[in-house]
Image (cartoon, grey):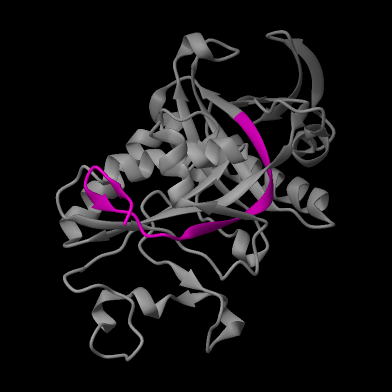
Amino acid sequence: MLEINGVPVEDTYCEAFEGIYSRIIVTAKHGWLLKKAAYGATALPSTVFGESEGGIEAWLSPEETPDGRVGAILQIWVPKTKNFMDKLMREMGKRIRQGILVVPTTRVFNATQSDTSFDAEINVGRCGDGYEWEEECWGRKVVVVPIMFGEFTIERYIGYAEGVAGGNVWFFCESEEAALEAGEAAVEALKKVEGVITSFDICSAGSKVETKYPEIGPTTNHYYCPTLKGKIPDSKVPDGVKSIPEIVINGVSLEAVEKAMYVCMDVASKVDGVVKLSAGNYGGKLGKYKIYLKDLVEKFEQ
């Protein structure tokens, strides 16, 4: 069996999907305000329910932002469907208005390198109820919304593009402590990989497509629940494995997702108590992309 740093890598693949993302920069006067906005705007991954999901790609210093204040790069994703534009406008508006605009001193700038964009005056600027106005600031065309605290500023045209969503890696661990250590190491390492987010960070509950309760959406992947080993005849949990965290990755390109998956496997394999590396898929029935773990090892270990 293929190995990374002495840890076996299962001969399998992750199944990833086409998605539409918008990448923005959020800034604020103080770090605590920035964190409130960044976490609030990206909370609750829910693309599986036909809405949107988000994540924090990177934290920025004042030297890295358009207005010279602390900032963060956020990604918001929607499924690639025929009506994705309507959904993107609604979801971006919702997350910006309710997650960022309401946090004092925040501003929003475009960070998507794309030829396509939407007009943020429509789904965010009109929060000014007709009293909003347009200016040229920081070399960008912005909409200024008067609010009770003062002003909220957003770049008028926000880009969007197609990316790859749902890349993932699984860590088979001997203990909960090892699982948390490996998961934390992976999430921390991915902060240095440009263009990717981990919308769940350390995901504790991988799901499957088939379910007894379709009305509530995906349910637990019972084959890989350690506490069901010995209770069900078709458990796929190896002996000695007590926890299986999943790192789910969205990225602006297939290359970015592949690099991020390899980084996750590399750092996790160095944690004591990680006994196998794997990934989740749906039998190749749902996603456009099949990312084979052995291909990643061969590609990035050269």
Front residue (pair 159, 265): 265
Q: Residue at x 38, y 34 (%)?
A: 301
Q: Residue at x 35, y 45 (%)?
A: 265
Residue 109 visible here: yes
Front residue (pair 47, 66): 47
The image quarter containing residue 230 is bottom left
Residue 258 magenta-drawn?
no
Check the picture and name the quadrant holding the N terminus.
bottom left
Check the picture and name the quadrant holding the C terminus.
top left
Q: Main SS of the magenta segment?
A: strand
Q: Is residue 278 above or below residue 300?
A: below
| Residue 31 percent location from the top left of the image | 40, 25
| Residue 187 percent location from the top left of the image | 36, 41
Residue 38 visible here: no
Front residue (pair 241, 51): 241
The image quarter containing residue 240 is bottom left
Q: Is residue 121 above or below residue 20?
A: above
| Residue 41 percent location from the top left of the image | 55, 43
| Residue 293 percent location from the top left of the image | 44, 51
Query: Does residue 244 appear to the left or right of 131 in the view shown?
Result: left
Q: Residue at x 55, y 15 (%)?
A: 65
Q: How many marks?
A: 0
The image quarter containing residue 267 is top left
Q: What stretch of residues is rendered in magenta?
A: 1-24
Front residue (pair 222, 139): 222
